[in-house]
Image (cartoon, rainbow, N blue to C red):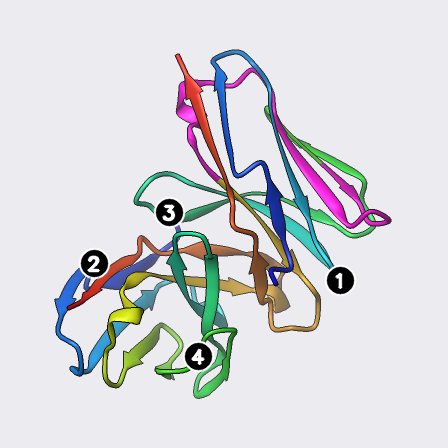
Amino acid sequence: DAGITQSPRHKVTETGTPVTLRCHQTENHRYMYWYRQDPGHGLRLIHYSYGVKDTDKGEVSDGYSVSRSKTEDFLLTLESATSSQTSVYFCAISDPVTGAETQYFGPGTRLLVL
Amino acid sequence: SQQGEEDPQALSIQEGENATMNCSYKTSINNLQWYRQNSGRGLVHLILIRSNEREKHSGRLRVTLDTSKKSSSLLITASRAADTASYFCATDLGNQGGKLIFGQGTELSVKP
């Protein structure tokens, strides 16, 4: 696997609480992505980053925010978790500018919002 | 609706048989990629085919792309039980920051 880790790997939280998921890479790739995976929907892009402090929204960004203060870390925050945000969250990296057009995925974070 | 739609949603075959999965998409693409996901794991890239390519091989994998029909197929030859996984196609529209749009996947089960 490429050098991508996600933390935590599992989390149970209550509705209304803030949650932050972390993605850490050691590949020095410029682009980082957050997806959620739900049955019947495949993978859907939440937010992505194309450099430090440069982020943009994806297909399902409502209720989520992100931050990238350094190349290796990309944080996903649920400001006030809802049950509809129960999902498996995947981080991915790529660097199409340098030819790394494919995406490398982290192991995922299973989030349960009660 | 999804840019990439896959068919079939589920496929069950015996070891040694070939498995074919199809992907259709709606808009012009820069490239199309296939990924594999074992249960409970992250996705792993299998193969990338560019819009100006028609066929590509990698080991037991063969991918075709028909841009006139906006479709692609993934063929796994001589399947093994270890090929049991979900397979996703993903389209790169180009100039979109490397963003990919994933299909919903085909769940392949290979029985020994």
Q: Secondary structure at mark 2?
A: loop
* Pointers 1 and 3 within a single chain: no
| Mark 2 closeness class: few <14, some 14–19, many ≥20 residues within 10 Å | some
Separation (CA) of disc 3 from disc 4: 27 Å
Judging by the rendered image, the residue that carries numbered circle 2 is: A9
Kindly identify the amino acid type of the residue bearing the numbered disc 1: Thr
Q: Residue at x 60, y 58 (%)?
A: A101
**Residue A61: which disc?**
4
Helix, strand or loop status at disc 3: loop
The mark closer to the camera, 3 or 2, is 2
**Apparent side of residue B97 relative to residue B95 in the rendered image (left or right):** left
Comparing labels 2 and 4, the label whose residue is closer to the camera: 4
Q: Between residue B71 and residue B30, name the one nearer to us.
A: B71
Q: CA distance from mark 1 to mark 3?
A: 31 Å
In the rendered structure, which segment of residues is drawn in magenta? B64-86
Residue on which disc 1 sits = B27
Residue A74 in percent (x, y) is at 35, 75
Q: CA distance from mark 1 to mark 4?
A: 22 Å
Q: Is residue B89 left or right of residue A89?
A: right
- Residues marked 3 and 4, same chain: yes
Q: Where's the C terminus of chain A, which quadrant?
A: bottom left
What's the mark number on residue A1? 3
Which amino acid type is shown beneath numbered disc 2? Arg
* Callout 1 secondary element: loop
Quarter where residue B54 is shown? top right
Q: Are marks 1 and 4 on the same chain?
A: no
In which chain is the residue bearing label 2? A
